[in-house]
Image (spheres, rainbow, N blue to C red):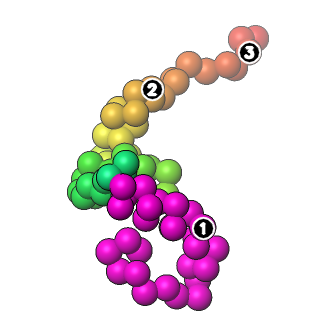
């Protein structure tokens, strides 16, 4: 939205946050940097990923899958 300031009906609720961020960018307190989709770890929270990419992002986040089972022994 910063690079294309045309507002659409769906983005009205972003108005206050957008202007806050826009001012921070203008005063060089924030800067925008391109992040390739292969490196965007946040995708793990927002998209359905292939197993390989999911496991890579889990590793990048430092998350380990617990294989320990809590089943009671009889």
Q: In this view, does 71 lie above or below 57?
A: above
Q: Where is residue 20 in the image (x, y as percent from the top left)?
A: 52, 61
> Residue 70's image quarter?
top right
Question: Which quarter of the rendering shows the C terminus?
Answer: top right
Q: Is residue 13 above or below residue 57?
A: below
Residue closer to the observer: 61 or 11: 11
Q: Do the residues labelled 3 and 2 touch (CB within 8 Å)?
A: no
Residue at 51% of width from left, 67% of height from top?
18
* Residue on which the image places disc 3: 72
**Mark 3 or mark 2: which comes first in sequence?**
2
* Residue on which the image places disc 1: 16
Residue closer to the observer: 46 or 6: 6
Q: Residue furthest top?
A: 74
Q: Residue furthest front?
A: 27
Q: In this view, does 34 lie above or below 29?
A: below
Q: Where is residue 5 in the image (x, y as percent from the top left)?
A: 40, 81
**What is the secondary structure assignment of the residue under circle 2?**
loop
Q: Residue 64 carries which label?
A: 2
Q: Can residue 47 be seen in this view?
A: no
Residue 17 is a magenta residue? yes
Which portion, as a residue range, is magenta? 1-27
Q: Position of residue 12 (x, y in %)?
A: 61, 79
Q: In this view, does 19 lie above or below 50?
A: below
């Amino acid at each position: 939205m910063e690079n294309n300031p045309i507002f659409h009906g769906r983005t009205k609720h972003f108005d206050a946050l957008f202007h806050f961020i826009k001012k921070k960018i203008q005063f060089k307190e924030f800067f925008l940097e391109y992040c390739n989709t292969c490196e965007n770890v946040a995708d793990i929270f927002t998209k359905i990923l292939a197993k390989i990419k999911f496991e890579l992002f889990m590793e990048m986040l430092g998350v380990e899958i617990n294989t320990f089972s809590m089943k009671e022994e009889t």
